[in-house]
Amino acid sequence: MDRKRLEEQLRAVRDHRLTVEEAAEHLQDLPFKDLGFARVDHHRELRRGLPEVIYCAGKTADQVAAIAAEIAAAGDLVVGTRASREQFQAVARVLPHALYHDIPHMFIADSRGQATRYGLAAVVSAGTSDLPVAEEAALMLEVCGHNVYRFYDVGVAGLHRLLDVVADLRRCQVVVVVAGMDGALAAVVAGMVSAPIIAVPTSVGYGASFGGLAALLAMLNACSSGVGVVNIDNGFGAAVLAHSILAMAASAR
């Protein structure tokens, strides 16, 4: 339930196109629906601008499918992150239009139609091994309604690859930088562009990378100013933060 649909229902009652009883039927499961194992938050989009997203890890396939069906029944966008093929197959049985994306392990069921894209973001990855996290961020930004440039495998081990795309990066309103190992790419990009930088450390790397901790600490200690850092492997969180920045910029115009 977003603000636009809520206002439309209230206007319909005012204009006698919808009875009070019909409106109550539509609104009775708000602000959340208790499924026994999950309380689906139908007012998330009203408060935050995005509907609830399903974090699938640790849930059974049937639980994921039931949550997805409940979100879809409210007319909302359905997104699942960290989803297995088995979980997606259960979702596809109740939402046949859902699509699975293998690299980021995400599914999306979008019945909203083609939305007008209004923001311009870039997602940059240091290496090909960072693609699952980078694609999680890029896909989430796209379903939020933004145009996304993807610049992958442009890490600091071959700086000429990054220099080749700097002109395009400077056109973007926000840049998500995804890197494992030493995490140096975020500071380098931040020194070259004026847009806000959202850095995502990944768990890619050898032993002393400590599962992404080395990259996380390097990004937090970036010499270049204006770098914000999210949790290890959290491409989704980076995308939501980038969306918030882009949405506020659009509303200010």
Image (cartoon, rainbow, N blue to C red):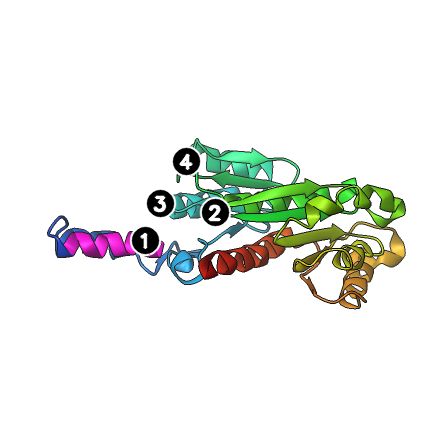
- In three-dimensional space, the C-alpha distance between marks 4 and 2, rounded to whole angstroms, equals 12 Å
- In three-dimensional space, the C-alpha distance between marks 3 and 2, rounded to whole angstroms, equals 19 Å
Which range of residues does the magenta coloring cover?
A: 1-13
Residue 198 point in image, percent of width and height: 67, 58
Q: Is residue 168 above or below residue 30?
A: above
Q: Secondary structure at mark 4?
A: helix
Residue corresponding to mark 2:
63
Q: Secondary structure at mark 3?
A: loop
Residue corresponding to mark 1:
4
Q: Main secondary structure of the magenta part?
A: helix
Residue corresponding to mark 4:
94
Q: Check disc 1 and give the amino acid type.
A: Lys
**Mark whose residue sits in front, 4 or 3:** 3
Residue corresponding to mark 3:
75
Q: Check disc 4 and give the amino acid type.
A: Val
Q: Which mark is residue 127?
A: none
Mark 1 or mark 4: name the one nearer the start of the chain: 1
Proximity of marks 3 and 1: CB atoms separated by less than 8 Å: no
Q: Check disc 3 and give the amino acid type.
A: Gly
